[in-house]
Image: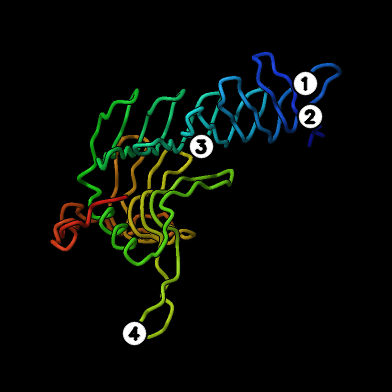
Amino acid sequence: MEQHLGFIENYNLPHGGTYTGQCRKNGPFIELKGQGQVYYPDGSSYKGSFDYGRPLGLGKYVFPNGHFHWGYFDNLPNGIGYLNEQTGFTIGSFDDGRLYGWAIKFYNNRFQFGWWENNKLIQDESKNVLWCRAIITQRLRLAKEAHLIQVSTEDLGFIRFGFPNSKHLNRISGRENILPSVGFKFLKDGRVIVGEFDDTEMTGQMLVYNKTKTFQFGWWENSNLVKENNLQDYQNPSDYYEEGLMVFY
């Protein structure tokens, strides 16, 4: 049964912060529920989903220094998230604010991808995804402006490092070519899709990292592995490693 939610503005919270947004009212009691924003005494803020009086669901937490964490919360970051800081970023799965699961860390031009536990890299897969990083870099050369990180606001959401499906004008033929999605797509269920693929049908040459710390590489159609390939053979072509190809800014 759908509940009627009220709205409050600049509501003083017990911890000293103020809340503006949706709520459920029960006499003198106020429960934060729905969409809202909290400004905390230390200068930080959170904007997004609330339930049971706390951040729960998709939201964005901004630190006092301007850094931010955008993703799923259960009070603390829990689930996939994107942490943006001055020297780099982290994308991946969090458990009570600490990395646990598949994640990318990119700081001071150092790229790391793999399985993390308690903020420590346990299974390093960085070399196994060089081919995908190269494709992202090649696509960057075609784009005048690029936003490499996208956060889905859908309930069954994702966070992507790379490009969504897009159109590109062929200078020779004058026709528009459809460029498939490419990159690292972190899904809400803890899996990561790496490669070039159609976003809607999940079809293409993909490396799928599972929650069991295993992966499958090959050609997929409608999320089904049709032909399994050898990952190392796919990485051998020298054009993936031309000078300057692997640098991201």
**Distance Cα–Cα, label 3 vs label 4:** 41 Å
Q: Label 3 vs label 1: CA separation?
A: 25 Å
Looking at the image, tell me whether mark 3 or mark 4 is earlier in sequence order.
Answer: 3
Mark 4 or mark 1: name the one nearer the start of the chain. 1
In the image: residue 141, left or right of residue 163 = left
Q: How crowded is mark 4: few (under 14 residues within 10 Å), some or many (20 or more)?
A: few
Circles 3 and 1: CB distance less than 8 Å?
no
Answer few, some or many: residues within 10 Å of disc 3's Cα (few below 14, many 20 plus, some between 14 and 19): many
Mark found first going from the N terminus, 2 or 3: 2
Question: How crowded is the residue under tag 2: few (<14 C-alpha within 10 Å), some, or many (20+)?
Answer: some
Left or right, residue 29 beside residue 122 = right
The amino acid type found where label 2 is placed reads Ile
**N-term-proximal mark, 2 vs 1:** 2
For disc 4, the marked residue is 172
Left or right: where 93 falls relative to 108: right
Q: In which quarter of the image is the N terminus?
A: top right
Q: Residue furthest top?
A: 14
**Cα distance in 3D space between marks 2 and 1:** 9 Å
Instruction: Answer yes or no: is residue 116 visible.
Output: yes
- SS at circle 2: strand
Residue bearing the label numbered 3? 71
Q: Name the residue under label 2.
A: 8
Is the C-beta separation of discs 2 and 3 under 8 Å? no
Amino acid on which the number 3 mark rests in the picture = Gly
Residue on which the image places disc 1: 30
